[in-house]
Image (spheres, helix red, strand yellow):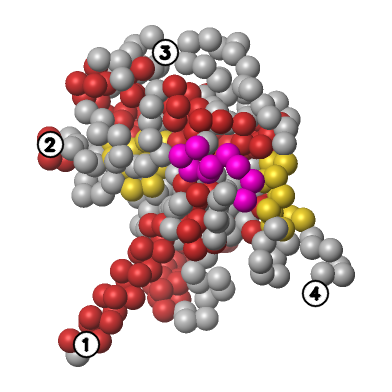
């Protein structure tokens, strides 16, 4: 009985430790097309904004924002600020406490990791740019050595 | 009361597991021949906001956001992007995103017109379906700023798409990326072509 108990405890401890330390890497695993907006946020002392495309496209077709509301197809290309949002432009067209939750929920949008630049997360362009940057950094390092 | 042997076994277990953890960590980091070492394993897809790397886990709002897996569970799968086949989800009625800000019953104006683009290289020709695009977009989203609405008027190359122009305004950012070659290059060339 005791032997069985101890075997179970042994197995449980090993399994628990394996699970606890088999953590995922700390690389960004965010959703494809999550947009980080940090044109003004951190300069104004707020966290960057994370806009989840996936959540919004489930509820509205692209054309509603990228057409009716005038959002350009470019991250950081819309010059959005809180005054415009309060006046019902851009995000403020829905985030008015009627269609969607209102702007006093600052941290629901301003929830980005500090120091994250404006980007479309996981976009082909940013991946290519990242590879080019890595390559040029490697070359610079080589030149220094 | 736990016997001495049980206690001893537990201590041995702890030691073994600590050792296993070090070995595991070392192998995971240093094995140069790890399987698919550059690929994101399926377990890391659709991470919840608090561990996705771009949300600040210390922000109160982060924990209130919906984890994508909860939303995607029943939706048709795809091999890239969000790992969701969004067009199929609209086609089969699982998703019915609204077409108008104020009128929930407004219907999308769908144009069912395929454009065949003959491509120069060995790849199959491109079939561009207006249908799947107008289910999401208005004509004015693409015409005339991105594509001149005239046959033969638009030079498109994979290079420009990769740089985020033409199809690449959406494909590679929010719509399925260019790694899904066959979803566009889907019309085989005639066999007798030189």
Count of marks placed on residues: 4
Residue B93 pos. (x, y %): 70, 26
What number is the disc on residue B194? 4
Rounded to the nearest angstrom, the CA distance separating label 3 from label 4 is 58 Å
| Picture quadrant of residue B149 | top right
Disc 2: which residue: A45
Callout 3 crowding tier (Cα within 10 Å): few <14, some 14–19, many ≥20: few
Q: Secondary structure at mark 1?
A: helix
Residue located 79% across and 63% down the image = B189
Which numbered mark, 1 or 3, is in the foreground of this view?
1
Q: Chain of mark 4?
A: B
Q: Secondary structure at mark 2?
A: loop
Rounded to the nearest angstrom, the CA distance separating label 1 from label 3 is 57 Å
Q: Is residue A55 one of those drawn in magenta? A: no
Disc 1: which residue: A143
Q: Chain of mark 1?
A: A
Residues rendered magenta in the picture? B144-152
Toward the viewer: B143 or A6? Answer: B143
What number is the disc on residue A99? 3
Residue located 31% across and 28% down the image = A108
Toward the viewer: B62 or B12? Answer: B62
Magenta stretch: dominant secondary structure: loop
Q: Secondary structure at mark 4?
A: loop
Q: Earlier in the sequence, mark 2 or mark 1?
A: 2
Residue located 47% across and 46% down the image = B169
Rounded to the nearest angstrom, the CA distance separating label 2 from label 4 is 63 Å
Image quadrant holding the N terminus of chain A, namely: bottom right
């Amino acid at each position: 009985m005791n032997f069985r108990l101890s075997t179970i405890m042994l197995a449980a401890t090993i399994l628990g430790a394996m699970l606890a330390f088999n953590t995922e890497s700390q690389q960004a695993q965010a959703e494809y097309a999550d947009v980080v907006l940090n044109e003004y946020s951190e300069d104004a002392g707020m966290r960057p904004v994370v806009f989840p495309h996936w959540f919004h496209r489930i509820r509205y077709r692209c054309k509603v924002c990228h057409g009716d509301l005038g959002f350009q197809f470019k991250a950081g290309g819309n010059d959005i600020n809180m005054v415009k949002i309060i006046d019902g432009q851009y995000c403020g067209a829905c985030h008015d406490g009627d269609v969607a939750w209102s702007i006093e929920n600052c941290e629901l949008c301003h929830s980005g990791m500090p120091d994250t630049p404006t980007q479309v997360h996981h976009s082909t362009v940013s991946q290519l740019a990242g590879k080019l940057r890595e390559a040029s950094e490697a070359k610079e390092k080589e030149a220094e050595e | 009361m736990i016997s001495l042997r049980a206690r001893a076994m537990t201590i041995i277990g702890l030691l073994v597991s600590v050792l296993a953890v070090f070995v595991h960590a070392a192998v995971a980091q240093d094995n140069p021949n790890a399987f698919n070492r550059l690929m994101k394993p399926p377990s890391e897809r659709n991470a919840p906001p608090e561990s996705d790397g771009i949300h600040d886990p210390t922000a109160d709002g982060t924990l209130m956001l919906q984890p994508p897996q909860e939303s995607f569970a029943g939706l048709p799968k795809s091999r890239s992007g969000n790992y969701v086949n969004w067009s199929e989800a609209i086609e089969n009625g699982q998703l019915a995103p609204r077409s108008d800000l104020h009128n929930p019953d407004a219907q999308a104006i769908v144009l069912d017109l395929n454009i065949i683009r003959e491509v120069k290289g060995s790849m199959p020709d491109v079939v561009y379906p207006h249908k799947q695009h107008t289910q999401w977009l208005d004509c004015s989203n693409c015409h005339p700023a991105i594509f001149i609405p005239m046959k033969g008027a638009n030079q498109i190359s994979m290079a420009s798409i990769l740089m985020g122009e033409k199809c690449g305004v959406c494909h590679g950012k929010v719509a399925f990326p260019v790694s899904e070659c066959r979803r566009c290059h889907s019309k085989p060339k005639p066999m007798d072509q030189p």
